[in-house]
Image: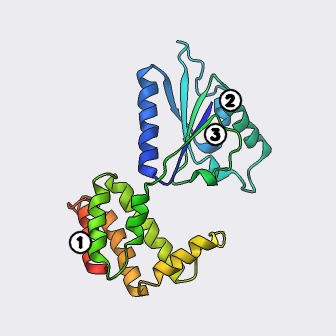
Amino acid sequence: MLTIICGEDEVGSRAYVNDLKKHYASKGYDMYEVGPRDIGSILNDDLGASSLFGSQSVYITSGLNSLIGRKKTNNEFLQQLDQLSVDQDKIVIDWEEGVSLRDIKIKNVTAIKEFKPSQTIFALLDSCYPGNKALFITMLSAVGSSQEEGFIFIMLARHIRQLLLAAYDALPVNTPPWQKNKLKSLAGKWSKPKLLQMYHGLARLDQGLKTSTNTYGYIKAIEILACYCL
């Protein structure tokens, strides 16, 4: 069985994977971490799917979707994915980091669970521009009461990066026209120096929290950054 866990809510999807691991571990399943290019070892039972004690195994991998469509992707790899999706004796969980359901290219899977961001987070992102500081901070507090702080930071950092690309006409060519127009419109509310300041500020904030040199937490630190940049 091949189950894909995906969605822009990376924090939620990752937490779900961890919950699945705990669930299977509590039932006595053996757990194996497998690289996306090594899934053939699952089919060949190289990792001990049939143990001496007869316990079933769960295989955790990530990024299978990223290998689809590459020149080096061969038919054998695609056939292996097809086999895993119908093999009831092998439980494979694939985590796709930040990948939306519409971007999943694996055709045959047993199940897919997508974690979508709430609409409130998108409203928060749209409110992030100079001159709108009070509303942004108010919405940040509201969203922070129901969404995980790390997820809010990831979405905001990704949004500001997209605005930078829009400001410099460097968005990917496959960006949908409606999204490109919206990003350019939002980027137009910023000066390029301010946008760069916000982006660098978020990068320093993340580094500080990861190295424990910033003790505010994501929400409070974003509030402070907003006071400088908005």
Extreme residue in the right direction: 75
Residue bearing the label numbered 1: 224
Report which residue position mark 2 lands on. 43
- Give the crowd class for mark 3: few <14, some 14-19, many >=20 residues within 10 Å: few
In the rendered image, residue 122, in percent from the top left (x then y), is placed at: 43, 63
Per the image, label 1 sits on a secondary structure element best described as helix
Q: Label 1 amino acid?
A: Ile
Is 126 on the left-hand or right-hand side of 5?
Answer: left
Classify residue 51 as left or right of residue 131: right
Q: Tell me the quarter of the picture where residue 224 sits.
A: bottom left
Q: Residues within 10 Å of mark 1 (few under 14, many from 20)?
A: few
Is any part of residue 179 visible from this angle? Answer: yes
Q: Which residue is mark 3?
A: 38
Disc 1 and disc 3 in contact, CB within 8 angstroms:
no
Quadrant placement of the N terminus: top right
Q: Which circle's residue, 1 or 2, is located before the other in the chain?
A: 2
Residue at image point 63% right, 69% down: 176
Locate residue 167, reporting x and y percent.
Answer: 51, 82
- Residue at point 68%, 50% (across, down): 105
Q: Nearer the viewer, residue 105 or 125?
A: 125
- Secondary element at image label 3: helix
Q: Amino acid at mark 2?
A: Leu
User: In the rendered image, is residue 172 in sight?
Assistant: no
